[in-house]
Image (spheres, rainbow, N blue to C red):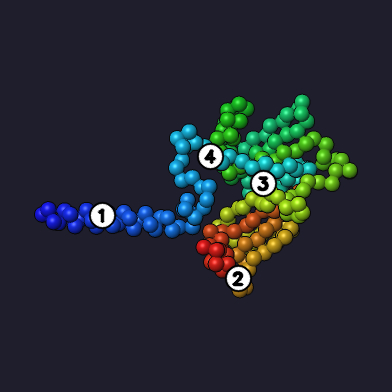
């Protein structure tokens, strides 16, 4: 019996060591990514990604694009009159369940995830001398794009084509599209993909 228990312990130890070795061999392990910390501090456990912000020229054009074309809803609008700008928070949350009270609606909007904040500096939409914002994809390179996961990338691309959306890049495999990059009214890039097409793109480029 004692020998059996020793064997079990050795097997468990071997399994643990193997698991540890495999974990250290993953691309995403701390060993392979200098600077990466895998221990999450207790102080940050409640953190989550809320929004990214882009500046827009014309809210009418941007709201139409992100609602009608991209299917998002307006979670909340904040108007900063003294500073002469407005923020429009767009996302995929069901706004039919959002509170009607302005303060509660604001709190609700800031508790959601994966939001895009459209910032409009008042007057840019009618200023003939305003040439627009830099989208980060021409020199000097910087900001790139946001990514939207769709249920079927080819169906989404066909729909965008029928709606006259601007395409800047399409990544294909054989005769089918895997990933597409479209532009919003201000020229910001949006990556369109579905889960399988994103995986296939990584495989095709030996990136996995």
From this viewpoint, which residue is outermost toward the right? 129
Mark 4 closeness class: few <14, some 14–19, many ≥20 residues within 10 Å = few
Q: Nearer the viewer, mark 2 or mark 3?
A: 2
Residue 129 location (% of width, % of height): 89, 43
Q: CA distance from mark 4 to mark 3?
A: 24 Å
- Secondary structure beneath dot 1 equals helix
**Residue 38 can be seen, yes or no:** yes
Q: Residue at x 82, y 40 (%)?
A: 124
Q: Residue at x 85, y 40 (%)?
A: 126
Q: Which residue is mark 4?
A: 48
Q: Is the C-beta separation of discs 4 and 1 under 8 Å?
A: no
Q: 122 and 165: which one is in front?
A: 122
Q: Which residue is mark 2?
A: 173
Q: CA distance from mark 1 to mark 3?
A: 54 Å
Which mark sits nearer the N-terminus, 1 or 2?
1
Quadrant for the N terminus in the image: bottom left
Q: Which mark is residue 12?
A: 1
Q: 180 and 134: which one is in front?
A: 134
């Amino acid at each position: 019996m004692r020998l059996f228990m020793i064997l079990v312990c050795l097997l468990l130890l071997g399994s643990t060591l193997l698991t540890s070795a495999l974990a250290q061999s993953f691309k995403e392990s701390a060993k392979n990514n200098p600077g990466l910390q895998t221990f999450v501090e207790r102080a940050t456990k409640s953190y989550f990604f809320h929004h990214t912000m882009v500046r827009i020229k014309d809210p009418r054009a941007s709201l139409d694009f992100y609602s009608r074309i991209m299917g998002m809803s307006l979670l909340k609008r904040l108007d900063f009159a003294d500073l002469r700008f407005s923020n429009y928070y767009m996302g995929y949350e069901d706004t039919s369940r959002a509170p009607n009270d302005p303060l509660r609606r604001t709190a609700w909007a800031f508790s959601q995830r994966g939001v895009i904040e459209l910032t409009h500096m008042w007057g840019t939409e009618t200023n003939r001398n305003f040439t627009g914002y830099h989208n980060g994809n021409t020199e000097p390179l910087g900001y790139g794009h946001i990514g939207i996961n769709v249920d079927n990338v080819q169906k989404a691309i066909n729909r965008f084509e029928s709606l006259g959306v601007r395409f800047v890049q399409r990544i294909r495999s054989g005769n089918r599209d895997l990933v597409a990059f479209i532009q919003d009214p201000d020229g910001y890039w949006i990556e369109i993909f579905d889960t399988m097409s994103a995986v296939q793109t990584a495989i095709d480029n030996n990136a996995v």
